Amino acid sequence: MSEIEFILIKLLICLIAICTAFLVSFFMVTFWYFHGKRYYLHLKHNLFRNKKQHRDFLEQAMQYYAKYLNIGPVYVYLCVDFDFWDYSRAGWVRPANHPAREAYDIYISDEGSTEQMLNWLAHEMIHIHQFNRKDLVQKVVDGRLRNFWKGKDMTDIPYHDRPWEKEAFGKSQKLANKFTVWYNDKIKEYREQKVT
């Protein structure tokens, strides 16, 4: 076998591997989409004794927020972490890389009550809604991440004066309260059905 044939065979094997990886990724995403799974939830630490209960509670909150805000199919990675790297904030969100759909990473601190965590999650989901509707866009300009609000660079505006933060702070508590009422009604309905 000549050296050229050997190189061509190696290239063919690499091409097959790349195509296979792409197809597997595509079909996994398609499978998720057509089976109604719109969100992926990861909890890094166990905050309650019953991890499944905690996971289900936050997943229901995230799905309620997404439905209420009319956020389209997205891939969301939620990390609840006591090793929070930025102690000046209770949470943050950033667009994430995903091969076939809009994706986001949300990090929230576990240094708060359940009510605070619901509020922090609502705040970050409102930011996803802002990204989703293209009002908030992040771009790297001259090697620096910049925040654009409705096409205008507003990176250097103080944190609490940023319009996307004003919107999120203005709506997050109301959204968390709506979820709490919905969740309590659901629990009450479940208990009444169980009794009868």
Image (spheres, grey):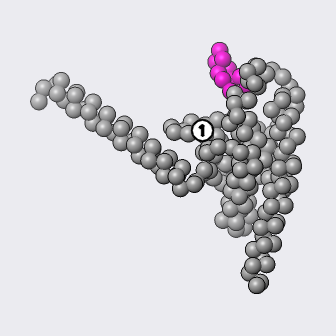
Residue, x 71% and y 50% (percent of image)?
A: 67
Please provide percent x and percent y for residue 20: 36, 42
Find residue 91 and report its horizontal and vertical position in percent: 76, 42
- Is 63 placed above or below 132 here? below
Q: For residue 161: magenta? A: no
Q: Secondary structure at mark 1?
A: loop
Task: Pick out the residue farthest to the left.
Answer: 1
Locate the N terminus and report the quarter of the image it occupies. Answer: top left
Residue numbers of the magenta segment: 138-147
Residue 81 location (% of width, % of height):
71, 49
Residue where numbered disc 1 is placed: 102
x and y percent of residue 11 in the render?
27, 30
Give the residue drawn at x 76%, y 84%. Answer: 196
Q: Is residue 4 left or right of residue 160?
A: left
Query: Residue 57 lies in what quarter of the image?
Result: bottom right
Looking at numbered disc 1 in the image, what kind of residue is underneath it? Glu
Q: Residue at x 83, y 59 (%)?
A: 180
Main SS of the magenta segment? Answer: strand
**With 169 as the anchor, is 79 left or right in this view?**
left
Which of the two residues, 151 or 77, is positioned nearer the viewer here?
Answer: 151
Q: Residue at x 60, y 50 (%)?
A: 38
Q: Give the residue at the far bottom of this rendering.
A: 196
Residue 128 in view here: yes
